[in-house]
Image: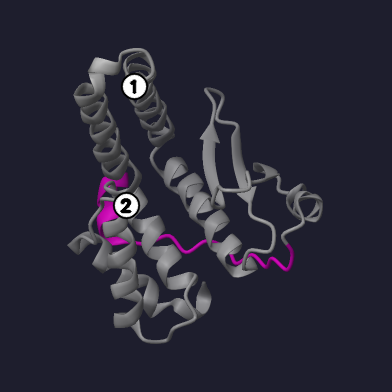
Amino acid sequence: MNFKAYLQEGIIVPKKISIKTTDIKKLQKQFEQDPIIGYNFHYTEEDQPASAAYLADDEDNINIEVYVKPGMNPKELEALIQHEIIHTIQDDKSGYRMAQELAKEFQARQKINDKIKKVCPTDKNALPKCIKLSQELEKWQAKHSFGSHQEEMTYAYMFVKGRKNDNPKDVMDEAKKWLNSQGAKFTKRMRKYFGMYWAVKGEL
């Protein structure tokens, strides 16, 4: 089965991890023995949410950057890290084409950001253009952050793993509401991934 067909038919269930702390020094020590992935833990800025990013360089070195919010639910942190671990497996199965696509996406996003920085602060008469560019960036981010097979699989995983609610409809409704707030949609494909992950919820 090729990579695209795999993403359409299967899900990736990563190996379980157990996190009991949000102390980044303890987390760094817990994950530093991984033979394949390099982990770097940081605290978020005060007004920023927890986040993580998967990075792979031209030599296929893999790093996961994790930004931890002190006191956050450790289960949410597990889901956040597993989201990126699934990406590492997806990338491996794609022959590392996925990392190349992410690099192109980063460059495209950077071009839009550069336009916004150039237009918005310097020209008071450019407000309509500034708003249009900002809206363009929001649409772009929604499409590329949530719209691919890869992202839909990982977010479906997070919704199933990160919620204690045992009613799948309630969790699905919560997922739809959150995605709508991000300018994205809960698609038929994500619903399929959601159902497949819910069927193995106990393994997550």
The image quarter containing residue 104 is: top left
Q: Main secondary structure of the magenta part?
A: loop
Q: Say left or right for 116 vs 70.
A: left
Vertical position of residue 87 compared to residue 159: above or below = above
Residue 109 image point, x, y percent: 35, 27
Residue that appears at 37% across and 24% down: 113
Q: Residues within 10 Å of mark 1 (few under 14, many from 20)?
A: some
Q: Which residue is mark 1?
A: 116
The image quarter containing residue 124 is: top left
Vertical position of residue 155 compared to residue 197: above or below = above
Q: Which residue is mark 2?
A: 182
Secondary structure of residue under mark 1: helix
Q: Which segment is the magenta one?
A: 2-21
Q: How many marks?
A: 2
Residue 183 image point, x, y percent: 26, 50
Q: Which amino acid type is shown beneath numbered disc 2?
A: Gln
For marks 1 and 2, give the one nearer the viewer.
1
Vertical position of residue 124 compared to residue 143: above or below = above
Residue 88 image point, x, y percent: 50, 45
Residue that appears at 23% across and 57% down: 185
Q: Say left or right for 58 vs 117.
A: right
**Viewer-side residue, 115 vs 197:** 115
Residue that appears at 74% across and 64% down: 21
The answer for how far apart the CA atoms under marks 1 and 2 are is 20 Å
Q: Residues within 10 Å of mark 2 (few under 14, many from 20)?
A: some
Secondary structure of residue under mark 2: loop
Question: Would you say residue 146 sits in the magenta stretch?
Answer: no
Residue 159 image point, x, y percent: 41, 68
Residue that appears at 43% across and 60% down: 12
Vertical position of residue 188 compared to residue 81: above or below = below
* Marks 1 and 2, the one that precedes in the sequence: 1
Q: Which amino acid type is shown beneath numbered disc 1?
A: Ile
